[in-house]
């Protein structure tokens, strides 16, 4: 059996704000086992969990080269609705057959809303094998 990507850990000094952000804007629910330092954010259905872990004093927030991507059916509509809830995404970008937009979470991590997965599911053009050097 091949391993599945099931979670991403975000190191932060702003756990309460991060819980509120991902719950409010993306529908995640927060859980924490007694005695555990990790707060687990679970998506509202199938998807990847986000683990929030307290950052050490030496870790600089928002400096990891990672972006959390959230697939949505309609990027334009989601961005408009998010703005009404207080989350403003940047410009909408054309990603060759799909649209995406970027923002930051309270700890400065990059996040994106994208139609890439939905577009890939609808188009055989995305099923081209990768060839190194091409």
Image (cartoon, rainbow, N blue to C red):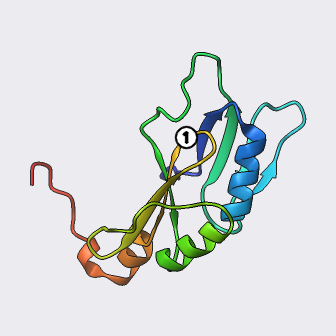
* In this view, 104 is above or below 23: above
Along the line of sight, the residue nearer the viewer: 14 or 66 = 14
* In this view, 128 is above or below 2: below
Furthest toward the top, the residue is: 58
In this rendering, position of residue 67 left or right of residue 48: left
Q: Quadrant of residue 12?
A: top right
| Residue 3 % position (x, y) | 51, 49
Along the line of sight, the residue nearer the viewer: 44 or 63 = 63
| Residue 116 % position (x, y) | 39, 70
Question: How many residues crowd mark 1 within 10 Å: few (<14), some (14–19), many (20+)?
Answer: some
**Residue at the image point whose x is 63% and y is 44% from the top:** 106
**Residue at the image point whose x is 44% and y is 76% from the top:** 118
Along the line of sight, the residue nearer the viewer: 36 or 72 = 72
Q: Quadrant of residue 81?
A: bottom right
Mark count: 1
Furthest toward the bottom, the residue is: 122
Q: Quadrant of the C terminus?
A: bottom left
* In this view, 109 is above or below 11: below
In this rendering, position of residue 92 left or right of residue 30: left
**Residue at the image point whose x is 53% and y is 51% from the top:** 5
| Residue 98 % position (x, y) | 35, 74
Furthest toward the right, the residue is: 34
In this rendering, position of residue 22 left or right of residue 133: right
**Residue at the image point whose x is 26% and y is 71% from the top:** 96
Question: Helix or strand or loop: what does disc 1 sit on?
Answer: loop
In this rendering, position of residue 32 left or right of residue 129: right
Give the residue at mark 1: 108
| Residue 91 % position (x, y) | 40, 64
């Amino acid at each position: 059996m091949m391993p599945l990507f099931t979670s991403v850990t975000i190191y932060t000094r702003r756990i309460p704000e991060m819980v509120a952000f991902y719950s409010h804007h993306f529908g995640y629910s927060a859980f924490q086992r007694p005695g555990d330092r990790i707060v687990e954010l679970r998506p509202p259905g199938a998807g990847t969990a986000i683990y929030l872990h307290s950052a050490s004093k030496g870790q600089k927030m928002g400096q990891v080269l990672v972006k959390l991507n959230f697939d949505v059916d309609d990027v334009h509509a989601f961005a408009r609705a998010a703005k009404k809830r207080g989350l403003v995404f940047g410009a909408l970008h054309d990603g060759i057959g799909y649209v995406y937009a970027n923002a930051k979470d309270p700890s400065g991590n990059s996040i994106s809303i994208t139609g890439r997965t939905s577009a890939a599911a609808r188009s055989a053009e995305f099923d081209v094998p990768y060839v190194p050097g091409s």
